[in-house]
Amino acid sequence: MDNKGYKSGFVAIVGRPNVGKSTLMNYIVGQKVAIMSDKPQTTRNKIRAVYTSEEGQIIFLDTPGVHKPKSKLGNYMNRTVENALREVDVILFLVDASEKLGPGDEYIIEKLKEVRTPVYLVINKIDKVHPDELLPFIDQYKELYPFEEIVPVSALQGNNVNRLMEQLLARLPEGPQYYPADQITDHPERFVVAELIREKVLHLTREEVPHSIAVVIEQMKPREDNEHLIDIYATIYTERPTQKGILVGKQGSMMKEIGMRAREDIERLLGTKVYLNLWIKVKKDWRNQENLFKNFGFYD
Ligand code: GDP
Ligand code: MG
Ligand code: K
């Protein structure tokens, strides 16, 4: 493929819970990808959605709502947010036009000031307010931070979202198409699925296999001829061949048991039938390999 003039890059979406981050992401990729809910913090993990067009590719990172950390997981989530902010080309700061600027927004703006990444203020839910309210709303935010662009949208109805995409593509550097055009997202459920498998391993092997294992979901997608069946390919990484031996078990019995129990839980989680394909690999010292760690999601 001739990549000349092709744009690509990474965009983080930050914003308080319920401002519409998942809704925007879903509109952009044209199908439901993130777990939507009225409850805050349902999107626990970093989600990647990929928007591909003739002009370029935008890789979106959804982030959990920024909040003052209360737990280790909270700390992790804030770390995720901060790393995301630093590593991306553009940050979309999503706010709710129908809500007053609050401490949560101010907290995020403080974080934005710590990084050099350009920030777009995306004012969502404009369908809920009178146009006259928009200017004073924008002025309040302008006083707090020098946003590079200010884009009012309705993620729910899709108003002005295409314009936002055009602006982003214009802003991104020339770059390759990182992902195939049909790869829409890394499902947020992947994280939970990996955790379920890991839980079964630790439970069934008791102390024999230490916590030094990691589960990576290689692929997870509905089967082409049957949307009610999801194929999941997962790899369990161990540090030593002896651990692999324990996990496989006599004639594969342990592996079978892990797979069966994990599948039951995953089916309950996803509400569909699941075909779970488990692999076990030995990866020496994976814990000290930073890159690998990144792909594993959340582990202490
Ligand atoms: P998140 O927590 O930031 O990911 O927010 P969600 O995407 O889960 O949205 C929270 C709620 O706001 C949901 O009930 C959405 O339907 C609603 N919502 C999101 N975008 C809009 C919008 O543009 N207009 C209106 N009226 N509601 C929206
Ligand atoms: Mg969300
Ligand atoms: K939410």
Image (tube, rainbow, N blue to C red):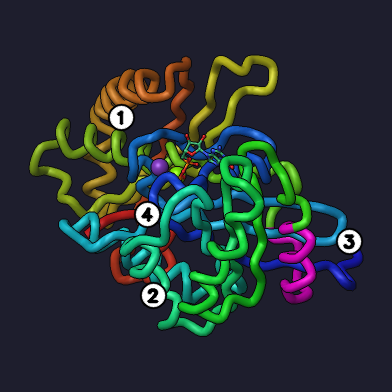
Q: Which residue is mark 2?
A: 111
Proximity of marks 3 and 4: CB atoms separated by less than 8 Å: no
In the shown orientation, is residue 117 left or right of residue 170? left
Q: Which residue is mark 1?
A: 255
| Disc 2 residue lies near ligand 1 with CB under 8 A | no
**Quadrant (top left, top right, bottom left, bottom right) of the N terminus:** bottom right
User: Which callout, 2 or 1, points to the residue nearer the camera?
Assistant: 2
Stretch in magenta:
164-178
Q: Is residue 162 above or below residue 207?
A: below
What element does badge 4 sit on? loop
Return the x and y of residue 120 as percentages of the image width and height.
60, 69
The residue lying at 67 percent from left, 67 percent from top is 9
The residue lying at 43 percent from left, 23 percent from top is 270
The residue lying at 35 percent from left, 61 percent from top is 102
Disc nearer the start of the sequence (3/2): 3
Disc nearer the start of the sequence (3/4): 3
Q: Which residue is mark 4?
A: 65
Disc nearer the start of the sequence (1/4): 4
Q: Which residue is mark 3?
A: 1
Q: Compute the Cα span from label 3 to label 2.
A: 39 Å
Q: Is residue 204 above or below residue 67?
A: above
* Residue that sits furthest to the left in the current view: 207
> Is 34 or 272 nearer to us in this picture?
34
User: Which callout, 3 or 4, points to the residue nearer the camera?
Assistant: 4
Q: Is residue 111 above or below residue 31?
A: below
> Is 48 or 125 nearer to us in this picture?
125
Name the amino acid, label 4: Gly
**Residue density around tag 1, few if under 14, some if 14–19, many if 20 or more, within 10 Å:** many
In the shown orientation, is residue 96 left or right of residue 30? left
| Disc 3 residue lies near ligand 2 with CB under 8 A | no
Name the amino acid, label 3: Met
